[in-house]
Amino acid sequence: MKSKNILIVENKEQERKLFEYLIGQLYSFSSFGSGQDALSYITQQSAHLVLISLQLPDLAPILFLQNAKKIWGKSCLVVAVAANGDEANVPYFKSQGFDEILAKPIRPKEFILKIQSLLTLQENEALNSPTLIETLPILNFDIYQQLVRLSSKKVIDQVYIDFLQECTFLFQLLDSKSIPFEEILRSIHTIKGNSGTLGAEKIYAAAKCSESLGRQQKSIEFAESLHYLKATFVELEEFLRKNPNLYGA
Amino acid sequence: MAREKMKILVGEDSSIIINLTKSVLAFENYSMKAARNGKQVLDMLAEEDFDLILMDITMPQMDGIQCTKEIRKLTDPKKNSIPIIAISGNAANHTPEDFRKFGFDDFIQKPLNYDLVLATVKKILS
């Protein structure tokens, strides 16, 4: 399982399989060939993004959109997929509140990038709200398991130990106040890349926020964000200490 | 007979990512060496042949974009045509066309998803 859930609603089987294949490389997904089934799903489950065909035979896409936004609000993006030649209707559907309209035929690399960039934008908006960062898991266990599957528990546990040590070193560097600002941003960028790859989601979100504030030279907010970043690190350290079976003895 | 191990050079300044990538690639029977910046990538490529480069964009001294441009200017056709995959933490700043113009064959966004890293490496090396 992966960290974000995408809902795919497409009645044409071949196209649905293509979406499943592409989305499945990065995200977990639930998939429906029937619009009515998807409508039932959203009353029970949540998703970060919905990909819905505008040509469903059993459901008007606007009706789905209204329900999805009513239930999930802004926490879920609704992306419509328009048929080849249906470009004329794009402005209308956009005005109805779809977050994005993608036109067929889908070009795989561009498609994946678009989905990634929409989810990143959504995440960035969430970063403006610390309460939303607080809802993230300190460690995404699915990512830890994926890494263990692709390597070995012993090696991966050591990588987490190295990550904690490197963060400790980088925070000492940040505390010393004698390093150039660009070097500070580089250290935060390193923490961001490493924490994201290791599934330390709260640290990743906090580092991303700090890096962004630093680049915008918002010095007061930036200083506050560093305190928060450190607090997320302490939380991970504590979590791993309390869960030795995950982390290694 | 077992195939000869494919050799991958990773340009990356984070030791965490280097160790992680090394262990994942070794598990798939690839051999990997690491350079900490673009200059080191060029030095190592001059000394040795590799089948593929995974190149981080943000590195000290010489970044991944500059390094890739330098590689494409080399006179040795075996070196200047080596496949290079960009790794970027700020991929939203560039379009796929930008990466192709810089000389990359493909790119992967950070945070790294190692299933995707392996799929991309296999696709390029197949």
Image: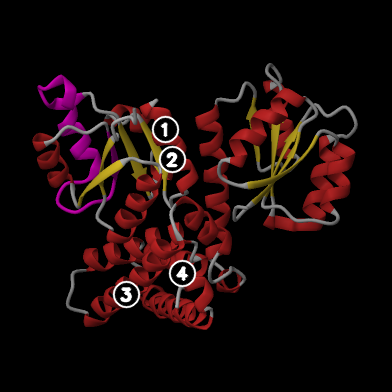
Q: Can residue B95 be seen in this view?
A: no
Residue at 82% in and 39% down: A62
Label 2 marks which chain's residue? B
Residue at 63% in and 31% down: A102
Label 1 marks which chain's residue? B
Residue A203 shown left or right of residue A28 in the figure = left
Residue at 36% in and 52% down: B23
Disc 2 marks a residue whose amino acid type is: Leu
* CA–CA distance in space, label 3 to label 4: 15 Å
* CA–CA distance in space, label 1 to label 3: 32 Å
Marks 1 and 2 belong to one chain: yes
Residue located beneath label 2 in the image: B118
Disc 3 marks a residue whose amino acid type is: Gln
Disc 4 marks a residue whose amino acid type is: Ile
Tell me the crowding category of disc 4: few under 14, some 14 to 19, or many 20 or more residues within 10 angstroms, Cα based: many
Q: Nearer the viewer, residue B41 or A249?
A: A249
Q: Is disc 1 in contact with disc 4, using a CB cutoff of under 8 Å? A: no
Tell me the crowding category of disc 3: few under 14, some 14 to 19, or many 20 or more residues within 10 angstroms, Cα based: few
Disc 1 marks a residue whose amino acid type is: Lys
Marks 1 and 3 belong to one chain: no
Residue located beneath label 4 in the image: A203
Q: Which of A222 and A228 is in front in this view?
A: A228
Residue located beneath label 1 in the image: B122
Label 3 marks which chain's residue? A
